[in-house]
């Protein structure tokens, strides 16, 4: 095993030699959330299933509104509609930016790389998320691609075309 100690500037230099752009995911990379034990009405396992459901993908593409998706997943998973709504509200409130990653992005940007963000995210979730970083932090990105604008979720190559 070889251990190499690289600084972020070393990494930027290596990246710059091979790549001109980097794409970052917003969810669970630049922003993290957690399901607190208090106030959460659905187990994390159920929440993960909902987030990977066809209904949720349609919501992220902008084909369903919030009330529609909550109703559909409540029916599909035999859950209380109120529990679904409350769980997602609590989850939204826990969103936090990852300042370490934002600092890395800042250095990559300063090294001359083009920086993009992509995310499977609904319009209402984008409204909440967009308030979690400063305008200066958002300006690090040359462009932000969201599923609700593209009407596509990033599960296949179409999102990247």
Image (cartoon, rainbow, N blue to C red):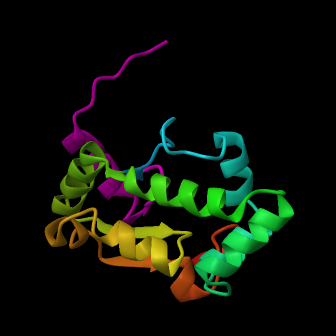
Residue located at (84% from left, 57% from top): 78
Examine the rendered structure and indicate whether residue 54 appears above or below residue 103: below
Residue 26: x, y in percent?
Answer: 43, 60
- Residue 131 is situated, as x and y percent measured from the top left of the image, at 27, 69
Instruction: Find the magenta span and give its range.
Output: 1-30
In the visual, does 55 lie left or right of 122?
Answer: right
Q: Residue at x 65, y 46 (%)?
A: 42
Task: Pinpoint residue 10: horizontal percent, then vertical percent.
Answer: 24, 40
Residue 161 visible in image: no
Check the image and report above or below for 127 versus 2: below
Q: Is residue 15 visible?
A: yes
| Residue in view at x 63 percent, y 79 percent | 67
Q: How many marks?
A: 0
Residue 68 shown in magenta: no
Q: Is 26 placed left or right of 97 in the picture? A: right
The residue nearer to you, when weighing 103 against 67, is 67
């Amino acid at each position: 095993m070889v251990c190499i100690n690289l600084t972020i500037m070393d990494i930027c230099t290596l990246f710059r030699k091979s790549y001109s752009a980097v794409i970052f995911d917003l969810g669970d990379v630049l922003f993290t959330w957690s399901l607190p034990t208090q106030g959460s009405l659905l187990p994390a396992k159920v929440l993960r299933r909902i987030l990977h459901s066809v209904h949720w993908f349609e919501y992220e593409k902008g084909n369903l509104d919030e009330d529609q998706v909550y109703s559909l997943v409540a029916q599909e998973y035999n859950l209380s509609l109120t529990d679904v709504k409350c769980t997602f509200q609590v989850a939204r409130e826990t969103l936090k930016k990852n300042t370490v990653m934002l600092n890395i992005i800042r250095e990559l940007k300063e090294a001359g790389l083009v920086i993009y963000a992509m995310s499977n995210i609904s319009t209402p979730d984008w409204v909440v998320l967009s308030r979690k970083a400063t305008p200066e932090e958002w300006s690090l990105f040359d462009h932000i691609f969201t599923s609700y604008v593209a009407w596509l979720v990033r599960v296949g190559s179409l999102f990247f075309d």
